[in-house]
Amino acid sequence: MPRETVAIRWKGDTDFEASLPSGKTVTMSGTGPKPLEMVVASLGGCAALTLQAFLQKMRIEVDHFDLDVEGVLAEERPSAIVGARVRIRFYGRDLKQEQIERAMELAKKYCPVHHTLIKAGPIEYSYEIHPTNAN
């Protein structure tokens, strides 16, 4: 079975450095970014990267897009993610609602972080299309 191994090293005080399989490092701390914030950011990053790949594959030309991701946390302690909301804004000319929705469905289907977090609770996706003019 494939695995992802991350090495975590204490750097002092409340700082910990994660060495990732990609060769990159991320520092997490008690003052931020916090691990739970990184989980929410991971959902947004995975959704964005997967969506961008499908937009490109489907030859949907967007000027750009951005996301807001909200992790829904349990009321009790310790805080745990019990759901999420992802809002995506697409900017471009001649963007078709059907194409955007298809790309979003494919992104959800193939985003491993989505599949991990959906087990914790519902993940709601919504979007806006903002037409831009040709320059």
Image (cartoon, rainbow, N blue to C red):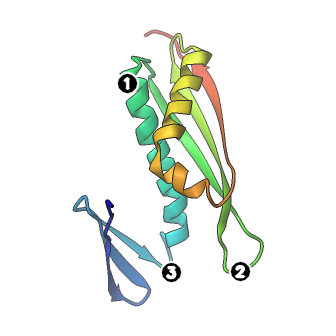
Left or right, 79 with reference to 15: right
Indicate the quadrant containing the N terminus: top left, top right, bottom left or bottom right: bottom left
- The answer to whether marks 1 and 3 mark residues whose Cβ atoms lie closer than 8 Å is no
Kindly tell me whether residue 80 is visible in this rendering. yes
Q: Residue furthest left?
A: 23
Q: Picture coordinates of residue 132 (x, y %)?
A: 53, 16
The label nearer to you, 1 versus 3, is 1
Q: Picture coordinates of residue 12 (x, y %)?
A: 35, 89
Measure how far apart labels 1 and 3 are at the Cα level. 38 Å
In percent of the image, x 55 and y 27: which residue is there?
90
Q: Name the residue beneath numbered marker 2.
A: 77
Q: How many marks?
A: 3
Q: Picture coordinates of residue 65 (x, y %)?
A: 50, 32
Label 1 Cα crowd, 10 Å radius (few <14 / some 14-19 / many 20+) = few
The label nearer to you, 3 versus 2, is 2
In this view of the protein, which residue sits in the foreground, 57 or 9? 57
Left or right, 99 with reference to 2: right
Label 2 Cα crowd, 10 Å radius (few <14 / some 14-19 / many 20+) = few
Residue 40 to residue 97: above or below: below
Label 3 Cα crowd, 10 Å radius (few <14 / some 14-19 / many 20+) = few
User: Disc 1 or 2, which lies upstream in sequence?
Assistant: 1
Question: What label sits on residue 5 in the rendered view?
Answer: none
Image quadrant where residue 59 sits: top left
Q: Amino acid at mark 3?
A: Gly
Measure how far apart labels 3 and 2 are at the Cα level. 17 Å
Q: Amino acid at mark 2?
A: Arg
Indicate the quadrant containing the C terminus: top left, top right, bottom left or bottom right: top left
Q: Picture coordinates of residue 20 (x, y %)?
A: 29, 65
Q: Name the residue beneath numbered marker 3.
A: 30
